[in-house]
Image: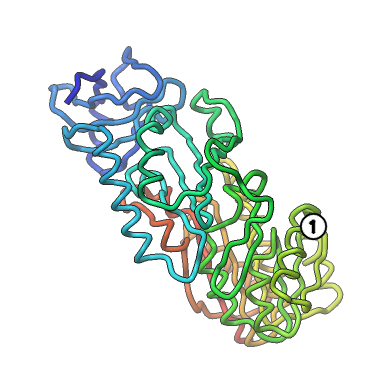
Amino acid sequence: MATRPTIVLSRKGVTWWRTGHPWIYRDDLLPGQSAAAGDIVTVQDEQGRFLGQAFYSATSRLALRFLTMSAEPIDSAFWEARLQQAWAYRRRAVAAATAYRLIYAEADGFPGLIVDNYDGHVVLQVHHPGISRCLDDLLPLCHRLLPVKSITLRNDSDVRRLEGLPLEVQTIFGQVPTDLIIQEGPVQFRVDILRGQKTGLFLDQRENRQAAAAWAQGEVLDCFSYQGGFALHAARQARRVVAVESSAFSLQVAKDNARLNGLENIDWIQANCFDFLKNAVHAGEHYDLIILDPPAFAKSRADRPAAIKGYRDLNRRAFQLLRPGGVLVTNSCSYNLDLNTFLDLLRQAARDAHRSARIIACRGAAKDHPALLALPESAYLKCVLAMAIS
């Protein structure tokens, strides 16, 4: 193994390291230590015992992201083995879809890297200078593994600022088609990988969209519809779908997607979802299936009180609008709101709506977004299906 800079953990840091969590914060390092941004460093305790190898951050509070607990060489062969493992898993985990997540950061052993594949059009999000330095090894491996048509860097996430990295979007290989269409089960989507949210589509909700559609009948309400993912799946089963979204751009993409799929039973409404739900309750409307998929309300611990109130208000209105026997599919992508807290606020929302409900399922992200057991932050998405029984 090449000689690398050494970083020593404090006793508190070693205690945290023993939990298996792959992140070490700067407060858990002995003072006075540093390395260059993105360096691979050897990590030791105060007695000089080897603890592993990690990417080093020179600017973020999150100082170390572990790559391995062993002393193995970190070279092209190291990355190829991990990429092959990620690809082998996706071949088993993904079915009936031409768009999926190939690499999910630490859960696949690639700290700070997201790679999504849209039918051969590969999109990368690089969130750490360490993994950025490894792209010269990784990109040829992608070409060998997949029939790559284009490669785009969607490096426009604000998290890059924490690492002192510039924001940019650029296609570095091939050409991105102006009309990229992917298949998700029975539904097709047009995807804009240069301007769409995340890398173009919320791939983490793929399996939840299909699970929700299994309960679609009669009248369906889809709030925070974005580009119509849940609505399009539900419309294949329901008599009528009302899809509400505040963004005019997203709503136009959703309408185009509906035309692509030949679906004419969706009413597209541009509105604030909080206001729409409030007005629908006052108007005495009712639905057989309601889907809530809001953006993250709790991006930090400080946001939790306001987030809990916001989620509770949304779900209270939804319970008021459900017919008996109707199903609520409610989501939270806020890591800072755990599942138990989310279930508790749902209980409060049902109580405040004077409804009784039973849980049908508690789901997470699609299987191509596996959560790392030692990294609870990777299990961010909660999708709860609840049926109103009175």
Q: Which residue is mark 1?
A: 272
Give how far across and how far down residue 328 sits, in percent.
62, 74
Q: Residue at x 31, y 23 (%)?
A: 29
Asked if residue 369 lies left or right of residue 199, the reply is left
Give how far across and how far down residue 146 sits, in percent.
41, 52
Q: Quadrant of the C terminus?
A: bottom right
Residue type, numbered disc 1: Asn
Query: For this rendering, which residue is in front, 120 or 256?
Result: 120
Using the image, determine if residue 368 lies above or below residue 241: above
- Is residue 305 at least partly visible in the picture? no
Q: Residue at x 46, y 44 (%)?
A: 114
Q: Residue at x 29, y 46 (%)?
A: 82
Residue 138's image quarter?
top left
Q: Residue at x 46, y 21 (%)?
A: 59
Using the image, determine if residue 285 lies above or below residue 39: below
- Please tell me whether mark 1 sits on a helix, a strand or a loop: loop
- Is residue 20 at least partly visible in the picture? yes
Using the image, determine if residue 285 lies above or below residue 223: below
Q: Quadrant of the N terminus?
A: top left
